Image (cartoon, coloured by chain):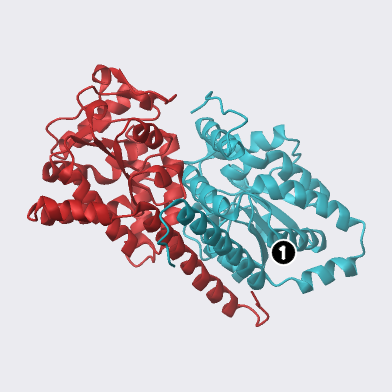
Chain colours: A cyan, B red
Amino acid sequence: MTGARIPNNHPRAESLRLREKLADSFVEGVVAVSGLIAHGRGEAFDYILGEKTSKPALRAIEAAAAALLTAESPVISVNGNTAALAAEEVVKLSDTTASKIEVNLFYRSFERELAIKKLLEKAGAKEVLGVGKDASAKIPELRSQRRRVDPKGILVADLVMVPLEDGDRTEALIKMGKRVIAVDLNPLSRTAQKATITIVDNIVRCAPKLIETAEKLKEQSNEERVRILEDFDNRENLAHSIVLMKKRLEKLAQKTCRRGRERCDH
Amino acid sequence: MTGARIPNNHPRAESLRLREKLADSFVEGVVAVSGLIAHGRGEAFDYILGEKTSKPALRAIEAAAAALLTAESPVISVNGNTAALAAEEVVKLSDTTASKIEVNLFYRSFERELAIKKLLEKAGAKEVLGVGKDASAKIPELRSQRRRVDPKGILVADLVMVPLEDGDRTEALIKMGKRVIAVDLNPLSRTAQKATITIVDNIVRCAPKLIETAEKLKEQSNEERVRILEDFDNRENLAHSIVLMKKRLEKLAQKTCRRGRERCDH
């Protein structure tokens, strides 16, 4: 996969470039096998969403920025796919919102933790929690290696951002009384449905927008940030994302049909 | 990933088992990195389709069986994902329909070709075309390694079945005057849209049904098989699959919304 050239005029060049980035990061030991499959799922949902940031995504981004800025001790949880696609954005967001960064993997291995830590440090991170013995605490109700968290990070956080989550951790964190921000292209996933705020968007598109929005909201009053949070309804917003996908499919079905014979009648 | 136990009562146990099978086959050198990502895309579309064989899929399966039985020299083209998920079904289908089997890969390597050939032979295949120097012919208009085909197989075939195709080969084959049967969970893909007959279904679900249908149609007259083919409209059928996905999303949006506050109003 590595080294193949993607022509700029390819209609889906950006998506193909991300795919290559993931494949390269897999070879470098940052991304797991399951991360590659998860990326494929994301690709499919992004395609249906039209590969652009939707209005519901923008509303969730605003709420997420407000939540990160009003939290006492926010933590951004980073897995292989997030590190591969958005290491620099994670570091910038952590700086802007005074959030800690913690590595947390479904399939934990010290080598992979170190590879991700290095990638984050190369992107400017000063502190990366959750690597090796630092993940000495355990959160209840989880069977995967994700239960192992840093006592200075996720364990004591009141808000955890989990981009590209692939598992059942969101529910466990919510049950522990934490608020959760998810970034998930699948609005139907358990993570998307259980999170406090779900951004249904590609991490590479929404991360820069989230940083920008956080920078703007920092200039506003705390009352304004709280008002944004109170106005936000995640269920309603998720339903809007699903409706968007439905409308896209409606258009694509009509297009497919028009190219065929005239007897389409659904 | 290997060795993890999936509980039988998991609501998506079958999907998780296939995911493991793919991951194991990757480790064994049968599946490529791009194949893992492609599998993830398939998972997403299958989820939206409700993970069952739809009526449009059944219609396409019937047409595909008729096409394989009426073709002069049909070939089933096998890539890593198809071998990993349905080697035995490919062999059975090849026996029932007197189709040849040819290995054809986007990312060609002799090791991978051999691993796939072995898997097919273990499943009972007597002849596997397209491995190593046997793929000495080239089909025009393709830049990937897929252009290399066997002069005894795809080159002279009048019908090529391409399950889990991930590329632009379908169009090239159609331009060469061949008929193409695709198995693709994404009804919007270029492959799905360009093929003569597109089965929008999971290969593990549709392959046994295709074998069964071919066995039944073998007992019928050739006129009956030709009638089935003439009655089949791939565009219309594809549009029905897209409409099905749309309807599923509609229901899921309503469900999401009902769980939230009452102000959903799309």
x and y percentages locating residue A71 in the rendered image = 78, 62
Label 1 environment density (alpha carbons within 10 Å; few <14, some 14–19, many ≥20): many
Looking at the rendered structure, the number of numbered marks drawn on it comes to 1
The residue sitting at 92% across, 56% down in the picture is: A219
x and y percentages locating residue A115 in the rendered image = 59, 34
Instruction: Say which chain tag 1 marks.
Output: A
Vertical placement of residue A46 versus A121, above or below: below
Q: Residue furthest front?
A: A262
Query: Is residue A165 or residue A143 the one in the foreground?
Result: A165
Question: Looking at numbered disc 1 in the image, what kind of residue is underneath it?
Answer: Asp
Give the secondary structure at mark 1: loop
x and y percentages locating residue B244 in the rendered image = 43, 65
Q: Is residue B15 visible?
A: yes
Query: Is residue A84 or residue A185 the one in the foreground?
Result: A185
Query: Is residue A134 or residue B235 the one in the foreground?
Result: B235
Q: Along the horizontal axis of the image, is A52 left or right of B32?
A: right
The residue sitting at 37% across, 40% down in the picture is: B165
For the C terminus of chain A, the image quarter is: bottom left
Q: Is residue A114 visible?
A: no
Q: Quadrant of residue B45?
A: bottom left
Vertical placement of residue A132 versus A155, above or below: above
What residue did someone put label 1 on? A158
Q: Along the horizontal axis of the image, is A118 left or right of B251?
A: right
Vertical placement of residue A7 versus A243, above or below: above
Q: Residue furthest left?
A: B219
x and y percentages locating residue A6 in the rendered image = 56, 28
